[in-house]
Image (cartoon, grey):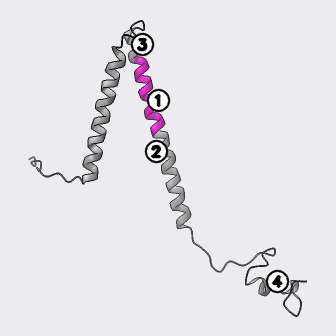
Amino acid sequence: MTTPASSTSSRTPFGKSLVRAVVRAGRLVNQLETGILYSRVLAAVPFKYRQIGFQSFKVMFVLAAASVAILLAIGMIAVWTIAALPISADRQPRIHEVSHPQHQLKYPELYDDNGALR
C-alpha cells in the first residue's frame, strides 16, 4: 500500500530559495558545458578530449569544495570540543605565577613576614 504525496511542502523559505539557487547553478553549469563543448575556439581539440577536460574540471571543483567543507567541519568539531572542556576554577598556581591570588598560600617559603616576595 502506498501513501499519497502531500501537496504542501515542509520546506522552509530558506530551504526553498536554496533549492532554487542550486537548480539555477546546475542549469548554468549545463549551459557553460554546452558552450565550451561546442565552442568554435576549441574546434581544433577533439570532442572527446573536450568532454574529458570539462569532466576533470568539474571533478576538481567538487573535490575542492568538499575539502573546504571537510576542513570547516573539522574546525567546528574542534571548537565544540574546546568549548565542552571543563574550566577548572580551583587550579593551583605554579611557582612562576606570582600574580595568582593563591600563590602566597601555596608557596609561603617565597614570602617574608610582611607578605612581600623575597
In this rendering, position of residue 116 left or right of residue 40: right
Q: Residues within 10 Å of mark 4 (few under 14, many from 20)?
A: few
**Front-most of 18 and 90?**
18
In space, the residues marked 2 and 4 are separated at their CA atoms by 50 Å
Q: Judging from the image, what secondary structure is the residue with disc 1 in?
A: helix
Main secondary structure of the magenta stretch: helix
Q: Is residue 52 above or below residue 106?
A: above
Q: Is residue 8 above or below residue 89?
A: above
Percent across and percent down for residue 56 are 44, 23
Residue marked by disc 2: 69
Q: Is residue 92 above or below residue 59?
A: below
Which amino acid is tagged 2?
Ala
Q: Mark 2–mark 1 contact, CB under 8 Å?
A: no
Percent across and percent down for residue 58 are 41, 28
Which amino acid is tagged 4?
Tyr
Which amino acid is tagged 3?
Tyr
